[in-house]
Amino acid sequence: HSFIPSFAEQRRMTEKGSQNNNTTEDQIKYGKTMSFFEKWKSSKDFVSAQLQVLVILAIAYVGNTWPTSYPRNDNHDPKMFWVMNGALLVAALFTFKHDKDASSRGVQLLSRPQTEEWKGWMQFAFIMYHYYRVYYVYNEIRVFVSAYVWMTGFGNFLYFDKKQDFTIDRVVSMWLRINYFPILLSFALGCPLELYYVVPLHTVGFFITMFTCYMATIFKGQGMGYWKSNSLAIFIMLAIHIAFYETPAVNFLKIFSDEYHFRFQADKYSAWMGILSALFWRRFKEYMQWAYASSQPKLLAMWLQRLAGAFLIFFWYYGFGYMSDKFMYNPLHPYVFWIPVAGWLLLRNSSKYLCELHSTALEFLGKITLETYVLQFHVFMSKNVQHIPVILPGANADGPLWLKTANMLLCASIFVPLALWARKVTVMTQNSVTDLVGILMNRSSSTEVKVNHEEAAALVKSEVEGTAAVDKV
């Protein structure tokens, strides 16, 4: 379609891989042809990343097969779950940072630092839930998982809506960021990929969002306005979801596993709701400017927003969250998870000051959530999350609390730096492979240019020879 920018035009707009784009014209101009590895300047980074990931996988293997451990079910300790979350709250309070410049472009609703902060404390609670086997917070943890998938639809819609970047570069980059390390970890440790069920949820959520935005772009090219084109695309995607998840077609997922069948149904509308929320984000931001941008904030709006947020959270809890039987709650979850999510966002962004405030400790944890999610099963815990490793002698299931806590902190001192290292290696691989894709795609374009150049040269030669023959006659 002519209204969709060509690959080359999109690459220029997004300014990706500019240092590697050596066109045929440049080569003719400077009289040289660069070798493949001269063009792929990040090839050394790629090789280095693969060597480093081998070390990380080896450490994960040792952790997962640690000889001294005890069943995780024997580590049931709700009090320690709350103690550890209380410690995280203290760390958050001591690391709050107020960034006045955050509102230089207007009051920012759900800024990037705040998003990382949100991911950070949810991930911490998620890991402690696994470690201390706190069964009665199952429903809350389900909301946290859905909030992550909601963010996939939300964040990617904002990106595609703004950048219109439907290139192979973006697809490869995002696929690698989400799947590269989990797939290697699954293969190296011989564990099923469904253990990391959030990974395919994010991957599918990304493609759902990309396809929705691409449909909207097509509709815009046919003369539709912004709201009509996006609304139609989102409605079509909802119809596809209903046709799949609310009919026997959903049993197709059982081909892969019963676990996927359950997990995808639990979050069947999470990414879609994130897309829908992002569509109206402009309107929400307009409200934020009206309520909080001036030196005299609208106090009535502020407190009504806080009351609404608190009401939504309590409504969810007393209506659904209190259910002790997860088999009663699970079928309801896909339709109600958004209620506490909306409540949290209303509370967290209920003033200009709160929008400018974030915890750097939680932000740090939020940046490594993918890596901490997959490595918790093998390093912080062991035997594919079924056991608690014992490094300190005596820190067994019946050992003293102080020794078990010291053992947990020692495991964490290995687990967190390893996750940070894995993130660095993943990003190195992501960037270098994306550069490689850009070079390969550019080489294809250059071949076309070269063919056209040779055709033009032949035409000029024939014209010159024809002119000379006429002159001779």
Image: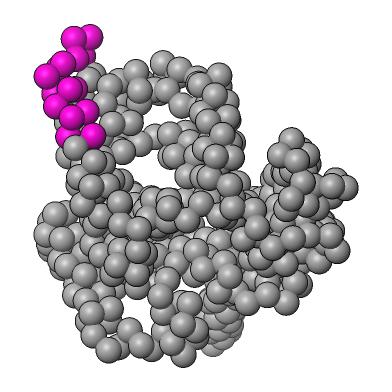
The answer, for residue 137, to whether it is visible in the render is yes
**Side of 42 relative to 105 (left or right):** right
- Specify start and end residues of the magenta stretch as a single range: 294-310
Instruction: Name the residue nearer the viewer: 354 or 320.
Output: 320
Q: Name the quadrant of the N terminus.
A: bottom left
Instruction: Name the residue nearer the viewer: 324 or 379.
Output: 324
**Side of 183 relative to 310 (left or right):** right
In percent of the image, x 35 and y 26: which residue is there?
Answer: 355
**Residue 369 image position (x, y, % from top left):** 56, 49
How many callouts does the rendering have?
0
Tell me, yes or no, whether the highlighted magenta stretch contains residue 110: no
**Residue 139 image position (x, y, % from top left):** 37, 55
Residue 245's image quarter?
bottom left
In percent of the image, x 14 and y 54: which residue is there?
Answer: 227
In percent of the image, x 26 and y 41: which residue is there?
Answer: 313
Q: From this view, report whether residue 334 is shown above or below residue 12.
A: below
Looking at the picture, the colour scheme in use is: one colour
Q: Magenta region's main secondary structure?
A: helix
Q: Name the quadrant of the C terminus.
A: bottom right
**Residue 149 image position (x, y, % from top left):** 40, 58
The answer, for residue 422, to whether it is visible in the render is no
Q: From this view, report whether residue 467 is shown above or below residue 348.
A: below
**Residue 7 image position (x, y, % from top left):** 45, 65
In percent of the image, x 52 and y 61: which residue is there?
Answer: 174
**Side of 113 relative to 24 (left or right):** left
